[in-house]
Amino acid sequence: MTAEHNKQIVKQLFEDAINRHKPALFDALISAEYVGPAGDRGPAAFAAVIGALTTGFPDIQYRLEDVFGGDDRVAVRWTWSGTHTGRFREFAATNRPVTNAGMAIFELRDGKIVRQWLETDRLGFLQAMGVVSPELGTPPQPAARR
């Protein structure tokens, strides 16, 4: 597969499967070799993570800021927005709007995603939901001089 074809597969993952809520497309995009964060495999492993997000944020929409790559790897940088109207993991709905930024590198083989490395702003995510203080992570202010 070409790098351009691999980029189209990753775009389809976000724009069609996730944003249009078509999880059946995961079977065509995610390899049986894929290993999820909990060690489970295949399209179901990827679907479990996205399912948790769409349960907590039913209106979630990803906006791809950058998509680039070469050979068998595709990197993406995104921003997603959604409203926390459902349970997300142990957090009850807060009805707050949430915007989150992240990036990932996907490895593809034979036209399917076999692996991903993900970085996202988890602290900002929890602060936007209101479950962590917005002051957490803020550097202390210097003491006033006398």
Image: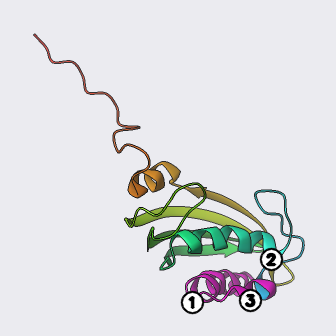
Which residue type carries mark 1? Arg
Q: Is residue 108 visible?
A: no
Label 1: state its secondary structure. Answer: loop
Label 2: state its secondary structure. Answer: helix
Which residue corresponds to mark 1? 20
- The segment highlighted magenta reads 1-27
The Cα atoms of the two marked residues, 3 and 2, are separated by: 9 Å
Q: Residue at x 47, y 69 (%)?
A: 79
Residue 145 is marked as none
The Cα atoms of the two marked residues, 2 and 1, are separated by: 17 Å
Position of the C terminus, as image quadrant, is: top left
Q: Position of residue 42 (x, y in %)?
A: 85, 73
- How packed mark 1 is, by other alpha carbons closer than 10 Å (few <14, some 14-19, many 20 or more), is few
Is residue 3 magenta-colored? yes
Does 4 sit above or below residue 105?
below
Which residue type carries mark 3? Ala
Q: Is residue 12 left or right of residue 34?
A: left
Which residue type carries mark 2? Pro
Q: Secondary structure of the magenta portion, mostly?
A: helix
Q: Residue furthest top?
A: 146
Which residue corresponds to mark 3? 24
Which residue corresponds to mark 2? 43
Label located before the other in sequence (3 or 2): 3
Q: Residue furthest right?
A: 33
Q: Is residue 141 left or right of residue 34?
A: left
Position of the N terminus, as image quadrant, is: bottom right
Q: Residue at x 55, y 84 (%)?
A: 19
- How packed mark 2 is, by other alpha carbons closer than 10 Å (few <14, some 14-19, many 20 or more), is many
